[in-house]
């Protein structure tokens, strides 16, 4: 076993344990995609969630097989996302073979390639990117993934139609109505809702027949999305432990703010109110069946 092979194996173990990953198929997808293919020529600039950027000694790809961020545009603090974080996101979403997945903000395509493996040849990935330079890089990097389509557009304006899963890879101030409307029944949305300091909470929203189950997944700090909105987001979004213990549903109906409204904003409300018994039962059955 050479050093690079050993580093890649250790990388998968690190992701598995840090992200608490339960899906062997997801881990195989991470193991099968060479990260260096998506990050340009080295040396690279790396950083962790607690340290500023540092440079690799040379262009040996072994340095990329750590649970670290890799700079795409250091001046803007735009990075290739933390592997353990996005592995956890994909695992929590329980993405299945043959599903149709939309990414809002695909960057250079690394996680699009992993999703391509997870959904398999009968599934599809729509990788949306707003920045032209990143679109061109992603298209080159993903040319061997026939089930991935890279689209240059604003993900707040178009997601290409109904989806089983929508993953937002940038911070926004609210869950956009387009994303909620585009979810198929049992569809899942993962969206980081953040303040202007890039900090906030990652929410998973599941569409049922007429209601939306909602839960806080974890704290997050992430690059702001294009069109994130000018509204000042309630600082409560950074209190993810409170959100995790209290948020149960997303309401979109017009209603007067009351004691069940954990975060009441124009167009949406994260509520402490549980789904009705029938919807809650269906959601529990669906979760059990997916295991």
Image (spheres, helix red, strand yellow):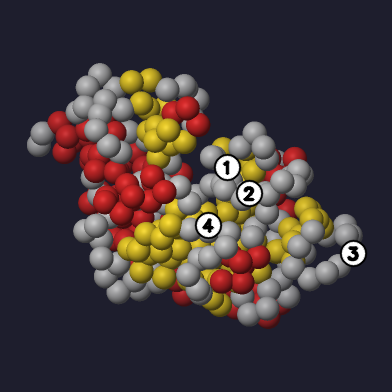
Image spot of residue 148 (x, y percent): 33, 63
Figure check: 87 above or below 280? above
Q: Which of marks 2 and 4 is nearer the N terminus?
A: 4
Q: Earlier in the sequence, mark 1 or mark 3?
A: 1
Residue 68 visible from this viewpoint: no
Q: Which of marks 3 and 4 is nearer the N terminus?
A: 4
Which residue is at 40% across, 64% downward?
126
Q: Splitting the image into 4 quarters, where does residue 194 fall?
A: top right
Figure check: 93 above or below 56? below
Figure check: 230 above or below 41? below
Q: Is mark 3 on a helix, strand or loop?
A: loop
Residue 228, numbered circle: 2
Q: How many residues crowd around disc 3 within 10 Å: few (fewer than 14), some, or many (20 or more)?
A: few
Camera-side mark, 3 or 4 = 4
Image spot of residue 199 (x, y percent): 62, 38
Residue identified by numbered label 1: 224
Which residue is at 44% across, 28% downward?
74
Q: How many residues crowd around disc 1 within 10 Å: few (fewer than 14), some, or many (20 or more)?
A: many
Q: What element carries label 4?
A: loop
Residue 154, numbered circle: 4
Residue identified by numbered label 3: 256
Q: Do the residues labelled 3 and 4 touch (CB within 8 Å)?
A: no
Camera-side mark, 1 or 4 = 4
Q: Do the residues labelled 1 and 4 touch (CB within 8 Å)?
A: no
Q: Are marks 2 and 1 in contact (CB under 8 Å)?
A: yes
The residues tagged by marks 3 and 2 sit, at their Cα atoms, a distance apart of: 25 Å
């Amino acid at each position: 076993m050479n050093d690079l092979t050993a580093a890649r194996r250790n990388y998968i173990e690190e992701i598995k344990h840090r992200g608490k990953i339960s899906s062997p198929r997801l881990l195989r997808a991470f193991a099968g995609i060479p990260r260096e293919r998506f990050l340009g020529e080295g040396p690279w600039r790396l950083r962790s969630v607690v340290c500023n950027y540092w440079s690799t000694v040379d262009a040996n790809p072994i340095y990329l097989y750590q649970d670290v961020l890799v700079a795409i545009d250091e001046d803007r603090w735009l990075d290739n996302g933390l592997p353990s974080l996005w592995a956890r996101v994909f695992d929590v979403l329980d993405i299945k073979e043959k599903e149709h997945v939309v990414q809002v903000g695909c960057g250079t395509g690394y996680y699009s390639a992993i999703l391509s493996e997870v959904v398999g040849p009968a599934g599809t990935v729509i990788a949306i990117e707003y920045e032209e330079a990143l679109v061109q890089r992603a298209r080159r990097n993903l040319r061997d993934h026939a089930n991935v389509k890279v689209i240059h557009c604003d993900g707040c304006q178009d997601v290409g139609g109904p989806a089983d899963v929508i993953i937002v890879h940038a911070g926004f101030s609210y869950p956009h109505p387009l994303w909620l409307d585009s979810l198929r029944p049992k569809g899942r949305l993962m969206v980081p809702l953040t303040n202007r300091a890039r900090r906030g909470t990652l929410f998973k929203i599941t569409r049922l027949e007429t209601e939306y189950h909602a839960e806080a997944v974890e704290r997050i700090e992430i690059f702001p999305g294009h069109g994130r909105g000018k509204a000042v987001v309630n600082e409560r979004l950074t209190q993810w432990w409170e959100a995790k213990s209290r948020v149960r549903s997303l309401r979109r109906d017009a209603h007067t703010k009351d004691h069940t409204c954990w975060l009441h904003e124009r167009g949406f409300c994260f509520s402490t109110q549980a789904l009705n018994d029938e919807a809650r039962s269906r959601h529990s059955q669906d979760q059990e069946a997916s295991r």
